[in-house]
Image (tube, helix red, strand yellow):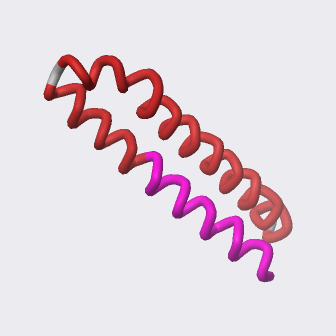
Amino acid sequence: MEDTRRAAFPVLSVFGLIVGILLVVLAEFVLDGLADGNETWHWIQHGVFFLGGLVVGVSGMHVYLSEQR
């Protein structure tokens, strides 16, 4: 059971990195046009940037720590 958990943990962390990068790309390129015309979309764009950065940071930390074991 422990081996299965260790094998799945880096996969979930790498998946989190991919999702976080996709969120940042979404905020940068897709929401940018909407954010220029509306203040609400501007703040939604900031929130998506924050969420994407948070996901990338936490996932990156988990990938780093899994390599230390």
Provide residue 13's location: percent of width, then percent of height. 66, 56
Quarter of the image where the C terminus is located: bottom right
Q: Against 54, is 51 above or below?
A: above
In the image, 13 versus 18, the foreground residue is: 18
Q: Residue at x 53, y 63 (%)?
A: 58
In the image, 59 versus 26, the foreground residue is: 26
Task: Give the main secondary structure of the magenta stretch.
Answer: helix
Q: Is residue 1 magenta?
A: no
Q: Against 14, is 48 above or below?
A: above
The count of marks equals 0
Q: Residue at x 14, y 27 (%)?
A: 39
Which quadrant of the structure image shows residue 63? bottom right
Provide residue 33's location: percent of width, then percent of height. 34, 18
Position of residue 47 in the picture relative to residue 51 (left or right): left
Quarter of the image where the N terminus is located: bottom right
Position of residue 33 in the picture relative to residue 66 (left or right): left
Which quadrant of the structure image shows residue 45? top left
Provide residue 21's location: percent of width, then percent of height. 58, 42
Provide residue 53's location: percent of width, then percent of height. 46, 53
Q: Which residues are magenta?
A: 52-69
In the image, 36 versus 27, the foreground residue is: 36
Q: Residue at x 37, y 39 (%)?
A: 48
